[in-house]
Amino acid sequence: MSIKLAAVVVVLPLLLSSCASYRNYSRGEECEKSIKDYSKMVRWGELETAVLSVVDKGQREAYAVTAESVRRRGLTMVDVRILAQQCRGEQGSAEATLEFDYFAMPDNRLKTVTDRQRWIYREEQPNDPDKVSGWKLTTPPPIFK
């Protein structure tokens, strides 16, 4: 066996595994960013933007109804906290728990709702422009009472 062939046999698997590890690490970072971005959009009253950017197609209608209800009732978000998140980039799934503090005038009592979320990583599909790659929220929206 030549030295070049031996080098290829040793180096190629290392190179491939490092590429896979980088992809999973990158997906994990992207997951954390998606969860943070979603929480910021909700905090600043940009629910319609959240519906279009991070909510999975199957849940968009429910989120659109919730966004309309929040706008119509005049809910004010006071704080959003990410209590826990677990991003599994290699499996393309994630879970997060967020808490939203809000109130609606004339009742100025602060209310809190906990939202347990499931996220999935969608691969880009060239034949469907609606399916771009990225993390998508798959659980129904929280109920703001």
Image (tube, rainbow, N blue to C red):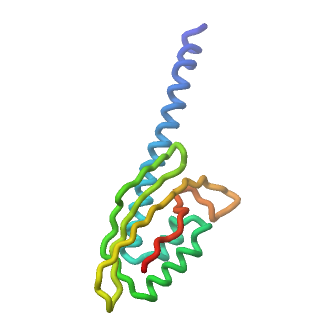
Name the side, left or right, on which 99 lies relative to 28.
Answer: left
Name the side, left or right, on which 36 lies relative to 109.
Answer: right
> Where is the C terminus found, in terms of image quarters?
bottom left
> Which residue is most to the bottom?
106
Quarter of the figure with residue 3: top right
Name the side, left or right, on which 72 lies relative to 101.
Answer: right
Q: Identify the residue shown where x is 53% and y is 68%.
A: 140
Q: How many marks?
A: 0
Picture coordinates of residue 7, whole percent (x, y): 53, 16
Picture coordinates of residue 84, whole percent (x, y): 37, 55
> Which residue is most to the top?
1
Task: Depth check: give the residue in front, 9 or 87.
Answer: 87
Quarter of the figure with residue 8: top right
Q: Identify the residue shown where x is 34% and y is 68%.
A: 80
> Where is the N terminus found, in terms of image quarters?
top right
Determine whether 100 is above or below 20 in the image: below
Task: Depth check: give the residue in front, 33 or 142.
Answer: 142
Determine whether 11 is above or below 72 in the image: above
Determine whether 6 is above or below 65 in the image: above
> Which residue is most to the right?
127
Task: Depth check: give the residue in front, 133 or 101.
Answer: 101
Picture coordinates of residue 19, whole percent (x, y): 51, 36
Q: Identify the residue shown where x is 40% and y is 72%.
A: 42
Task: Depth check: give the residue in front, 105 or 41.
Answer: 105
Picture coordinates of residue 58, whole percent (x, y): 62, 67
Q: Identify the residue shown where x is 33% and y is 64%.
A: 81
